Amino acid sequence: MADEKGTRTPFGHAMRSHFQYDPTYIPLNHGSFGTYPKTVRDTLHRYQDLAEFRPDDFFRYHLGGYVDSARSAVAQLLDVDAGECVFMSNATTGINTVLRSLVFEKGDTIVYFSTIYGACEKTVLYMKETTPVEASKIEVAYPIDDKDLLAKFEKTIGQLKKDGKHPRVAIFDTVSSLPGVRVPWEKLVESCKLEGTLSLVDGAHGIGHLDLKLGKVQPDFFVSNCHKWLYVPRGCALFFVPERNHHLIRSSIPTSHGYEPLPMEGQEKLFNPFPAGEKSRFVEMFQFVGTTDISNYLCMEEALKFRRETCGGEEEIMMYCEKVSNAGGKKAADIFRTEIMENAEGTLTQCCMTNVKLPLKLGDGKGEVKKAEAFQAVGWMARTLVDQHRLFAPPYFHGGSFWVRFSGQIYVEEDDFVEAANVLKELCERVQQGEHLK
């Protein structure tokens, strides 16, 4: 399918001309840090130049309007109201913003899965240290069927209520990080609604990766990195809060000029150096959060234009990325003589990342990896990939087995997975010989 201007570029290696990668590098880890095309880079630099041309004019009187245009563009993509969308630096900041805004009371509990992103779990533990809130972690080992994951979640909520606790908020992913699998987040949101628990969705791997239908699903809070899969420069995340929950978000992180203190006797209205507008308190709160370069937020429209005109649109991008990820993953599994991480329902691979079991075994026998050395082994493999082979896909340890997570993207082909698999197979053999311990 070509766009009306005829600028469509075929997916695969031909698409790499639009990006800035070292031509000798094999990028199979788009999921960690993402990247962006050269046209978006040019837009980024243009806004940075504009800011330096007349800084006061730019930051005080024009930046807000530029951000509004970017918010409107992403809101249209997700079929939600622009007044419910703001930007921040990353998904971890969004999780922090919600948890630090909620006022917790004794008995309140944060519910989350053991596959939560590490920084977010640490945020939960910090909240336990500093507030009355408790936490309940649901242990999960993949592969697992969606129905069993949902059953674990609902059983945990039910038990907490039986024990007199209040499951106040639940955190879960759209696509988890490690392993990189699709999570039935829509059904978890629905379960939260039925149980009266706030849903906090970590959509770090969401926008540009899945057809989110955010306006239909309507979670209580949703944050998604635009710099991972949407081709917006780092770090930029969409923070979606439906209007019904705006009152729960009291401050940005850090608190800045848009914050409005609750009325207190004798408290005078605080000065805001930025012009008053007609936007909501929620939007104004995130409009200017300290002096920093947010030119990346302003690249949203150019990123969406590239996806539409050069790539053929959201559906085409997602379809190719999922297809090449699954096909490449299967070829890697054949080389390893192992398997892809999948459940009986076939839902885990309905995303743009595929997890393949590595040909390594845990144990104390010859050629096996001792459990105490598992993380040392995957750490050595990761560093060796970039130091000696100019490619990267993160190896990791989960559920008693060693895995590698591959990311599909519009600029890779199945042969890239084959080359990476052959390298990883060699590294596994070197681990079996104990090289990771030297």
Image (cartoon, grey):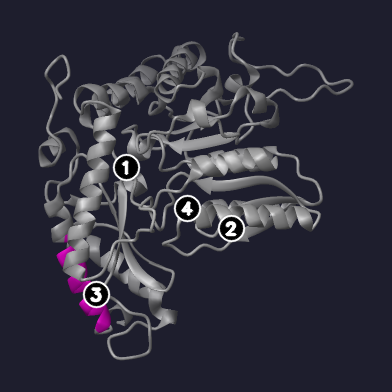
Range drawn in magenta:
420-432
Give the class, few, some or many, for how many residues have Cα within 10 Å of label 3's Cα (few <14, many ≥20). many
Give the class, few, some or many, for how many residues have Cα within 10 Å of label 2's Cα (few <14, many ≥20). some
* Kind of residue at badge 3: Cys
The residue that mark 3 highlights is: 428
Q: Secondary structure at mark 1?
A: loop
Q: Nearer the viewer, mark 3 or mark 2?
A: 2
- Residue 47 lies, with reference to residue 19, above or below; the image says above
Q: Position of residue 354 (x, y in %)?
A: 30, 54
* Mark sitting on residue 34: 1
First-in-chain label (1 vs 4): 1
| Real-space CA distance between mark 4 and mark 2, rounded to the nearest whole angstrom | 10 Å
Instruction: Report the residue at 24% width, 84% height from top.
Output: 433
Q: Nearer the viewer, mark 3 or mark 4?
A: 4
Q: Secondary structure at mark 2?
A: helix
Q: Secondary structure at mark 4?
A: helix
* Kind of residue at badge 1: Gly
Q: Nearer the viewer, mark 2 or mark 1?
A: 2
- Residue 252 lies, with reference to residue 132, above or below; the image says above
Instruction: Report the residue at 15% width, 51% height from top.
Output: 414
Is 321 left or right of 78, judged from the image as shown?
left
In the rendered image, which quarter is residue 428 located in? bottom left
Give the class, few, some or many, for how many residues have Cα within 10 Å of label 1's Cα (few <14, many ≥20). many
The residue that mark 4 highlights is: 146
First-in-chain label (4 vs 2): 4
Q: Is residue 427 magenta?
A: yes
In the rendered image, which quarter is residue 386 located in? bottom left
**224 and 66: which is toward the camera:** 224
| Real-space CA distance between mark 1 and mark 3, rounded to the nearest whole angstrom | 27 Å
